[in-house]
Amino acid sequence: MTALGGTLTEEQAQVREAKEKLGNRLLILAHHYQRDEIAEVADFRGDSLELARRAAQAAAQYIVFCGVHFMAETAAILARPGQRVLVPRKDAGCFLAHSVNRAQLLDAWDRLSAVMDGERELLPVAYVNTTAEVKAFVGAHGGACCTSSSAKAVLSWALKRSPRVFFIPDQHLGRNTAHLLGIPEEEIALWDPRHPPEDLTPFKKKRLILWRGACNVHVRFLPEDVERVRKQHPGVRVIVHPECREEVVKLADEAGSTSYIVRKVTESPPGTVWAVGTEQRLVGRLAKENPDKTVISLADVPPYCSDMSLIRLSDLARVLSGLLKGEEPGRVEMPEEIANPAREALERMLEAVG
Ligand code: 13P
Ligand code: SF4
């Protein structure tokens, strides 16, 4: 914990006290996009897959999840009976996750199923960046969840079981993953929930149907950015998240999850110059933690995820102080009828990646 002028702030002291008192009954998980003040006090930082795995394996009674709401929901779905998952800011949503709701998905499923032979011809795959209700729909229809680091394994798992896959909701992750699996553009179709087409027969011939959703942070990176950094920094390595547009991923040297980006930058030789196409809190921390390298944002104006930034140390301190008083502030609860099928979708992902 970095103390200001050698003394801890009140919030830092509260967090330290709670960690000491709760010991191994407490596990603080943080996504890589969290502010430094949170990343510093977390027991573990990771990408979505690693955090889901940690939550599933945790023995702690309290899992405090510093990340956006769908990530805490995932932890709550995977938690054991009696375990509590708490989130410091319940209002930390995800723009991408909210690009699909259960009603829209049901509508799309009904229309597409009407021209296909339902489950035998179409299998849903949901990025974890979705609500628990959407995951539950996917689980109940035999499908699986995926994260950015498990998308390739899960999509190939799904394509072995069904001639067609409905990938929800990030069109860019879906398309970038399809290309890794050698699926050509002609076999991919886009489903626009706001303008469903009248004639659905063309969808019958496609292998992959992508929901028209995208992350408002990652779409900010453009092919021009790659061209600009290559001119400004000859020899630069460009690494991007697969939520970026296909044109950007194609021009980059590497693409992968947030943990993949952390690993690649950290393990690179001193003197390497990196331009990183992902959320700025992570890029800023990578620059600080790798002083022997140059780490810059791929964008001219680096984008932040406003939802991830909502969680401050004061929010975490409030949750931890509540736990010490026997309260459970920010507890994430999930009705069984949603948690059970959603868990099936998540467990299929965990099995597909081994
Ligand atoms: P990762 O699974 O790579 O951590 O990504 C999560 C996310 O929300 C990226 O925007
Ligand atoms: Fe969601 Fe994008 Fe923020 Fe990731 S960066 S949590 S996908 S809005």
Image (spheres, rainbow, N blue to C red):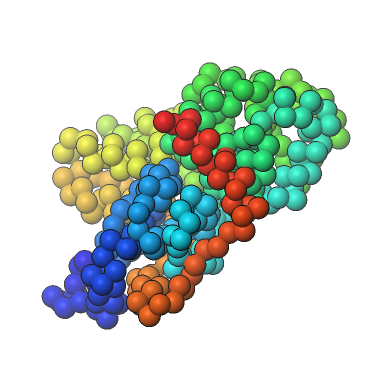
Out of 279 and 118, give the one closest to the viewer.
118
Please report the residue visible at 37 percent of the width from the left and 30 percent of the height from the top.
253
Residue 304 to residue 205: above or below: below
Q: In this view, does 300 lie to the left or right of 161?
A: left
Please report the residue visible at 30 percent of the width from the left and 53 percent of the height from the top.
44
Tell me the quadrant of the picture where the C terminus can be found.
Answer: top left
Q: In the rendering, at what x and y percent does residue 296 appear?
A: 31, 47
Q: In this view, does 280 lie to the left or right of 112?
A: left
Please report the residue visible at 29 percent of the width from the left and 73 percent of the height from the top.
18
Residue 40 to residue 236: above or below: below
- Displayed quadrant of residue 313: bottom left
Q: In the rendering, at what x and y percent does residue 349 appear?
A: 50, 36
Q: In the rendering, at what x and y percent does residue 19 appear?
A: 27, 68
Tell me the quadrant of the picture where the N terminus can be found.
Answer: bottom left
Please report the residue visible at 41 percent of the width from the left and 51 percent of the height from the top.
55
Residue 83 to residue 242: above or below: below
Out of 6 and 295, give the one closest to the viewer.
6
- Displayed quadrant of residue 106: top right
